[in-house]
Amino acid sequence: MSGRFSLKRIGLAVAAPVLAIVFAMLVTSVVLLAAGNNPLQAYSTMLAQLGKPRIQVNILNSATTYYLSAIAVAIGFRMNLFNIGVDGQYRLAAMLAAAVGGAIAIPAPFHALVVILVAMLVGAFWAGIAGLLKTTRGVSEVISTIMLNFIATGIVAYLLTPGRLAETTQGSNNIGTKPIPESGQVPGLAIIPGAGRNEVYGLIVLAILIGIGYWFLLSRTRFGFDLRATGSSEPAAVASGVDVKRMVVYAMLLSGAVAGLVGMPQLLGSSYTYSLDFPTGLGFTGIAIALLGRNSPIGIAFGALLWSFLDNSSNSLEFEGVPKQTVLIMQGVIVLSIVIAYELVRRYRIRQVARDVGRQLAATAPEKEAVA
């Protein structure tokens, strides 16, 4: 009985994202047909990219940053907090961490550890502002984190100028922080044969550890129980002795600390400097992936890999005469349909529980009458 119940729970958990992806493919197919393109040809072209070692490396590298971003968002989601400020938190953290990394000279691996620590502290500080505003002044974290994104953008633009934290790049119009020396760089992993010089970010290991830590914290610690309890029912959490305001601040600090890590794989594994072309928008991608993975570390991992595959295979569509923006349509439909799919699955689960309870009551009724 318990085995069937577990399989049913697993099936329901998988059903929502599968339904969302299938629905997104159907909508995208209609768009492709309307534009005069063959959907099967487009999908086969994208799937063929999985056999290329360079694309495999790019998928893993992009998925690493997506995963960290989604975990940062998921920490807030588990507390019923909508941290939209991950984008500003990681960009400000990456810029200041890059400046510190380029200014100091200490042996490896302490150099990279200092850069990572600075990034986490900056991210936690920036997210903590929203937490304090919510607990002391009742300001919605949605509004405050959006505004903090704009402020972070302004600070980065102000500091990333020659004469402050940036310097010009020879032979280019690009500007960036002073390059981090070799002692602060994290070597890549040559784990994919045939990829040549393309290597997987070494900090993919850090992303895996963050996922394990996220699971352990939420499911095996009192702090995680308090966080989940507060997110499920604030009055019940208060009744059990949980300091809700303190948990809000802690959750935002933790979410911001993980957000500060989002730019580290790129910074320490590839660019070694924060410049004008540093990746942006990863925070908003993390929101979509956290929804797709339902805040589960394993679900988020699959969502990050799927999102990364769609991003890195989209360029191949242009060789078939299909606009690569088609992938954006698919991603957008996935985000919209995942919410609907989860709601449908939730209602189905409630009906199933009600039926099971009704059957158990009906089965025990004759026994009670016989005893009477």
Image (cartoon, rainbow, N blue to C red):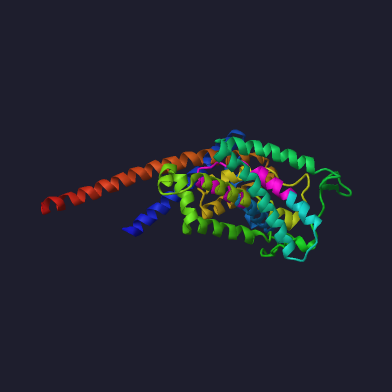
Q: In the depicted view, which residue is nearer to us: 314 or 33?
A: 314
Residue shown at the point (38%, 41%) measured from the top left: 347
Horizontal side, residue 153 vs residue 5: left or right: right
Is 94 a magenta residue?
Answer: yes
**Is residue 313 visible from the viewing direction of this image?**
no
Location of residue 132 in the rendering, given as x and y in whole percent from the top left corner: 59, 42
Location of residue 354 in the rendering, given as x and y in whole percent from the top left corner: 30, 44
**Is residue 152 visible from the viewing direction of this image?**
yes
Residue shown at the point (53%, 47%) measured from the top left: 246
Q: In the depicted view, which residue is nearer to us: 265 or 100?
A: 100
Q: In the depicted view, which residue is nearer to us: 11 or 161?
A: 161
What residue span does the magenta drawing correspond to?
Answer: 68-95
Question: Can you say whether 60 is above or below 127 in the image?
Answer: below
Is 59 a magenta residue?
Answer: no
Location of residue 215 in the rendering, given as x and y in whole percent from the top left corner: 51, 57
Q: Name which quarter of the figure residue 4 lies in.
A: bottom left
Horizontal side, residue 256 vs residue 353: left or right: right
